[in-house]
Image (tube, rainbow, N blue to C red):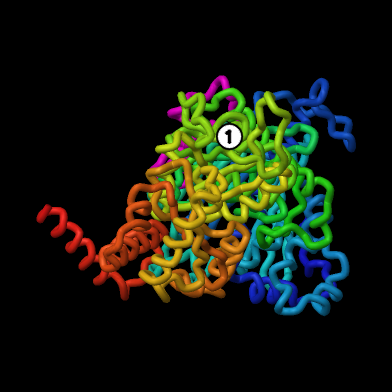
Amino acid sequence: MSEQSGFLSIESKNIFTILKKWLYTEQDIVFRELISNAADAIEKFSALQQDEGPAVDAASEDKYPEEKYTGEITVTLDAAQNRIIISDNGIGMTEEEIDRYINQIAFSGAADFIQHYSETQKNTIIGHFGVGFYSAFMIADHVAIETRSWKKGAASVRWDCRSDMSYQMTEGTRADHGTDVILYLNESHPYVNKEGKLKADTVYDIIKKYFAFLKTKIYFEGPDFDHALVNDPDPIWKKPEHEIQPEEMKRFYRKFYDDISDPLFWIQFESVDIGVRGIVFFRNTKNQTEELDGCFRIYNQGVYIGDNIKELVPRFVNLQSGIIECTDLPMVVSRANIREEEQKDNAISLIYECLSQEVTIGLNQLFESKRQEYEAFWPHLNAFVKYGILQDKIFASVMTRKVIFEDLYGKYLTIGEYLKNGSRSEGVQEVSRLGAVPQQDGGSVAGEPTEQKTVYYASDATEQAHYIRIFKQCGLNALLFDHVIDQPFLRRQELVHPGTKFIRIDSDMDALFQGSLTPEDEADAALLTKKIQRAVGARLGKLELKVSKLEQAGITTLILHDEKSRRMADMLEIYGMLGAGDISAKEAQSKSTLLVNLNNDILRYVVHVTDETQANLILNQLFDLALMSQGAMNTDYVGDFIARSEAIIGHYIQR
């Protein structure tokens, strides 16, 4: 071949300067682009071999000889000459192809490119204009190509180009088909250490990051690396489920995500129609102490694109970790963002929906066929499932009725299961009128079983321990809504279960336990009311005082909150409009009642006792106990409570 030299055909000569200035912080892209090109060249050569019969050169009609072909890529760090060589045994190029594809840069309107893109848009440049091979000049002032085409009789070609865009083509030295791209670095380059040597570990890590699962083998040679295999062409997460040993998958997860804990379980998925496959790992949240976002790594044809791309991964799914591989994903080369004009691309939305659907199907199958495992995983899935329901319509349409709650006896129930028969503790068939749950949304025909329309719940097992104890004494049941996400999630449940009331167990106890007064009780109730008002006085605050006669004689006093106003107060607290410990402010927002049980022996004693001092002591003690059961006792009265308690003990000893 004759020598050829000249300048690259491009409308603006300062394109390389712009690349270096604007994209200098993303030099790793060079390896992504050049190794991707090498992989493409190998794929093209493999495709030629897979055609019917020996491959044919359309131009010369000469058949390329058949051979047992294994494509591979080698990245070499030549420390002696401070250069990086990326070599493949792919299809190679002829002199004409170099002139067509390399010398004439495929920019559409380079002048517009220079004028249109400002500093604020620097991160989208490469993706819009397909710089590809020319990203090499981001890290090298001199780039060379040694290549030989697969075509019979093709000569080896060498191409050299410098950052002033001057190039020269001469006869090359490569004996076999394929291409070497040679990057000549200077000593000030970040890949060169203080001693002037190439940083082999850095380059190895970059290649592994971008090509961990490329199906073409990549080998790395350099200081301390002797033809080391960088990637895993056949990773375990791509294997059929029946071929996977669980311990192997767990080891892969721990290593890949640098997590000391095993995943709880995983869901593999594949959609041939839209060209996507992957795996979702459900993470061990260490009993909800580690509910940070997970990490989804996105690959396009085996090449790493980025993490947690919001256009592809539903927000709730991103609470877990996983891998997604696409076959044809339009991405910006310089960054892991989808091109703005392609954000509404059907393929992208289909991948998004596919991921949501696969997670939905997987969890639904776990609930339906492996309920025991589902319950064992629930402490880790709790927030994920509820957040997903609030965020994603596809997920919510299936999983809303698959949410489970722990009841007062340690058993997991869905809302539907609770409504059906979960209002009573297991083994309790009948609790007479005491255990009957009021039908607040209409009654039923006499003699027919009544469907429960009220779901009682506790939001804090410690603060509401007194009420929980009462429920258990009565053989009743309630669900624990004790996660931070449960309050907004509760509103969703009310929409899903129309006609059903959700009442916290410290609300509406009077109705629950069939409280009432007969005409004969009115006088005692009025007398007791006066004694309480006189004894407790201003401490009652805005509490409404109600005397009733509950069938459960063991109850003395209870503080009950109106459900709607209490929720409003809780919401104000969540949004920072009320302080977390501002009890008086919360009381001002909520409607609360001090319920006093006239059917209790202590209260009946107080009604008839003539010793006012003794009555005052008992009533104040009972009032403080009611406040303590709510965690609402004012610290100013703790001393009085202790003194009364000691006095009661002393009186008991003296008897």
Residue 394 quadrant: top right
Callout 1 secondary element: helix
Q: Quadrant of residue 453?
A: top right
Q: Is residue 338 left or right of residue 463?
A: right
Q: Residues within 10 Å of mark 1 (few under 14, many from 20)?
A: many
Q: Is residue 238 magenta?
A: yes
Q: Where does the image place residue 570, in percent across and percent down from the top left?
A: 55, 64
Residue 574 percent across, percent down from the top left: 55, 66
Q: Position of residue 132 (x, y in %)?
A: 72, 58
What secondary structure is the stretch in magenta mostly built from? helix
Specify start and end residues of the magenta stretch as a single range. 236-264
User: Can residue 503 be spotted in the picture?
Assistant: yes
Q: Residue at x 62, y 50 (%)?
A: 490
Q: Please say whether residue 161 is one of the residues in the magenta stretch.
A: no
Q: Which is more toward the observer, 356 or 260? A: 356
Relative depth, front residue between 605 and 340: 605
Residue 529 vertical position relative to residue 351 in the rendered view, above or below: below
Residue matched to label 1? 418
Q: Is residue 226 visible?
A: no
Residue pictured at 77% horizontal, 65% vertical: 5
Q: Position of residue 166 (x, y in %)?
A: 73, 70
Give the residue type that dot 1 points to: Tyr
Q: Which residue is depicted at the point 45% across and 39% down?
A: 408
Which residue is nearer to you in this view: 473 or 226?
473
